[in-house]
Amino acid sequence: MLICSVVGARPNFMKVAPVYHELRGRGVTQILVHTGQHYDATMSDIFLHELQMPRPDVFLGVGSGSHAEQTAGVMTAFERICLEHQPALVIVAGDVNSTLAGALVAAKLQIPIAHIESGLRSFDRAMPEEINRIVTDHLSDFLFTTESSGNENLLKEGISPGSIHLVGNCMIDSLCKHIGSALARAPWQALGLHPGEYGLVTLHRPAAVDNPASLEGFRHALREIAQHLSLVFPVHPRTRQRMDATGLDWQPVHLVAPLGYLDFLGLMAKARVVLTDSGGIQEETTALGVDCITMRDTTERPVTITVGTNRLAGTSPREIVKTAREVLETSPEPKSAPPLWDGMSAGRIADVLQAWMERRR
């Protein structure tokens, strides 16, 4: 019985890698399909290498484009792969366009679908990711959730309880496996920084960077914070294009090229604070016990606020700066990780899938 895993963007890699390794260790036949949604080497190849993933069996090479173009491109190419290889199950992860496209193709071909990271909801349908999450969940046969809010959301939407499995967070599996190697690299040294004396920034969502007024607001806030704390900003290629188009000065924020998984994880683990619009980073900082400021109005990961170190600051420059000051004026306090964020989520997923395969046989 062949299982097909679909990856396309860097967050997918950290979620799929632990499950891929776990299934391989149990002798399950697999095929890895990379859609090419993230095709730059700094956003793709280095992540696969550092997560010890094999070279993808299939690379679709879809690349960038509008949401419709990208989703349609993945669907057209992935349908051919499914017809050729006839997988018994398709695994998708997260909420990117490749996730939705893979699920749509599998559903129309009546191939069962497993969705890693199901049930997360921001309740903001202006976010493309929210649409991807909802549709993928309602197409899936196995819904693997990372936190209890995911279960609650799915049940409210009428998903069968028997399809929902609270397994924990596969991104934290990857973190637990690689944190030692990440810290050993001491990536802060190459930047002339010291542990606990810098902040780390990510900013990439279209709502944040495509609107010049929005991008200017973030620039203003980050420059003000950087007057009091060194800020390192590995710039996503999409964000770099928007920044270059404005020609505005971001100093004293230290802009650097995108980082690999290990260097970024090492920097994040020793940061005083992380400022982000990313969902996954909210989770990783919670697991690491690092203060996180989310520069968004909503979060689909409420557990990072209730039991973690995450603060939802909104998008107002004034509120972002205010929240940063509050964080920097208080001492970090130890926090407990959410339930089942123990580095063993992939094993729980594999148990469910292996039991299903045995029943199928």
Image: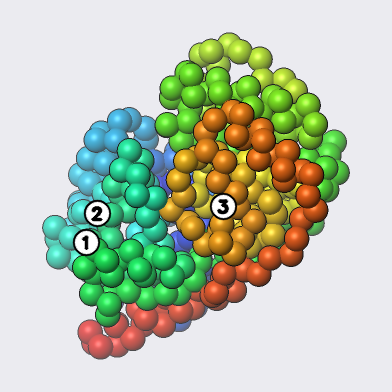
Residue 341, given in percent of the width and then of the height, sits at: 56, 70
Q: Looking at numbered disc 1 in the image, what kind of residue is underneath it? A: Leu
Q: Mark 1 = which residue?
A: 139
Residue 217, given in percent of the width and then of the height, sits at: 56, 23
Q: Looking at numbered disc 2 in the image, what kind of residue is underneath it? A: Val
Residue lying at 46% horizontally and 67% vertically, measured from the top left: 146
Q: Secondary structure at mark 1?
A: helix
CB within 8 Å, label 2 to label 1: yes
Of the numbered discs 3 and 1, the one sitting upstream in the chain is 1
Between circles 3 and 1, the one closer to the viewer is: 3
Q: Secondary structure at mark 2?
A: helix
Q: Mark 3 = which residue?
A: 282
Q: In the picture, residue 200 is in which quadrant?
A: top right
The dot on residue 135 is 2
Callout 2 environment at 10 Å: few (<14), some (14 to 19), or many (20+)?
some
Spatial CA span between label 2 and label 3: 23 Å
Tell which of 261 and 61 is nearer to you: 261
